[in-house]
Image: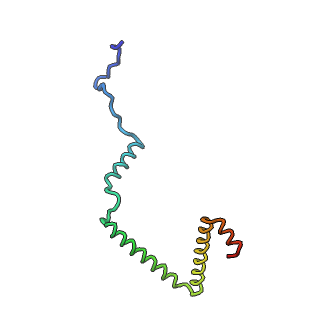
Amino acid sequence: RHGSRLQPAPGESNRKTRTMARGLSREQSKEKNAKKAAGPKGNTENLTPAQRAERDKAAMAAKKAAKDAAKTGMSAEDLAAEEKRKAEQRARQKEGSFAKANPLLAKQLKKAGK
């Protein structure tokens, strides 16, 4: 029975041929190769970490200055009310974290009115 194998047609080879990628596979391969050819990722500015930190620090200072300048446009009462609101919020956060750490003590202090 070994002799009954099918013979390849004339002009074809006996080995399996690799078929070309079609449709979506081809598009995905093109995108992947384009990404590879795009160049390196990461720090393309050629800055040291210290230089980047200095640049970021300057940017944050400029942002804070702009915010402060916008605040000065507020009236004195509005500015005082904003600061008071922030102080109250900080106090609530501090009290909440204290209560999480010592729930029994926080409950007793609240009862006592402190």
Q: Of residues 26 and 80, which is closer to you in this image?
A: 80
Q: Of residues 84 and 56, which is closer to you in this image?
A: 84
Residue 93, image x and y in percent?
Answer: 59, 71
**Residue drawn at point x = 65 percent, y = 68 percent:** 105
Residue 33 position (above or below residue 99): above
Residue 9 position (above or below residue 95): above
Q: In this view, does 15 lie to the left or right of 66?
A: left
Task: State the residue lying farthest toward the right.
Answer: 111
Picture quadrant where residue 59 is located = bottom left
**Residue drawn at point x = 58 percent, y = 74 percent:** 90
Q: Is residue 104 left or right of residue 82?
A: right
Residue 50 position (above or below residue 87): above
Residue 2, image x and y in percent?
Answer: 34, 14
**Residue drawn at point x = 35 percent, y = 59 percent:** 42
Name the quadrant of the C terminus. bottom right
- What is the image's colouring? rainbow
Q: Of residues 4 and 111, which is closer to you in this image?
A: 111
